[in-house]
Amino acid sequence: MRPLQMEDDNHIMLIANDYDVACFLRDSFPFPYSLDHAREFITATAGSDTSHVYGIMIDGSLTGVIGLILQEDVYRYSAELGYWVGKKYWGRGIATAAVEGITEDAFENKGIKRVFASVFAPNIASARVLEKAGFTHEGTRKKAAYKNGVFEDELLYARLGN
């Protein structure tokens, strides 16, 4: 993993502009995904004190994006995890390794005690990524999200540090 750079804009656009990726993400992740979207995303995440966003790199190529949003107030020792990987990189353990890496870094270097993530119920592969990375399914929020014209259950996962 490494911080995103403006030079990543074209590659982010190419792997993000895929309905099979976007359909499992929040609506703030646009589809179609343009070069301007990629540039805006890189700029926005670079200037944030509470978001830590990285490119997921394999052999020098950007394969996806992962990030933590540090929480505030009474939740200040928690961080929300989000990630996506380009479709051509699915099924290779890339997301699991990235989730493990960023979670360990949060515990060891950022003072975080709890990392949490949510997954739309149809995204079985992402739920499995979290489970393989040591996250526990804490519960399900029934019909919590409206995505693609359908109410979806949201699966809640978390991993606790020491």
Image (spheres, helix red, strand yellow):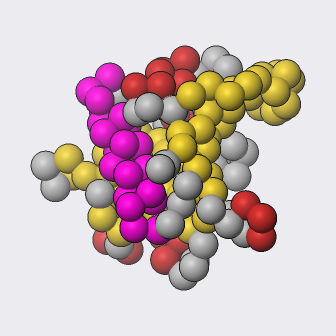
| 30 lies left or right of 1 | right
* As drawn, 36 above or below 121: below
Query: Residue 113, how many percent across, how many down?
Result: 55, 55
Range shown magenta = 91-110
Query: Residue 71, how many percent across, how many down?
Result: 68, 64
Quarter-of-image position of residue 4: bottom left
Quarter-of-image position of residue 31: top right
**Residue drawn at the location 47% of the way across and 68% of the way down:** 110
In the rendered image, the residue lying farthest to the front is 162
Of residues 54 and 115, the one nearer the viewer is 115
Query: Residue 103, how many percent across, how many down?
Result: 43, 50
Query: Residue 126, how many percent across, how many down?
Result: 51, 28
**Residue drawn at the location 69% of the way across and 43% of the way down:** 26
| Magenta stretch: dominant secondary structure | helix
Of residues 96 and 104, the one nearer the viewer is 104
Looking at the image, can residue 17 be seen? no
**Residue drawn at the location 63% of the way across and 57% of the way down:** 78
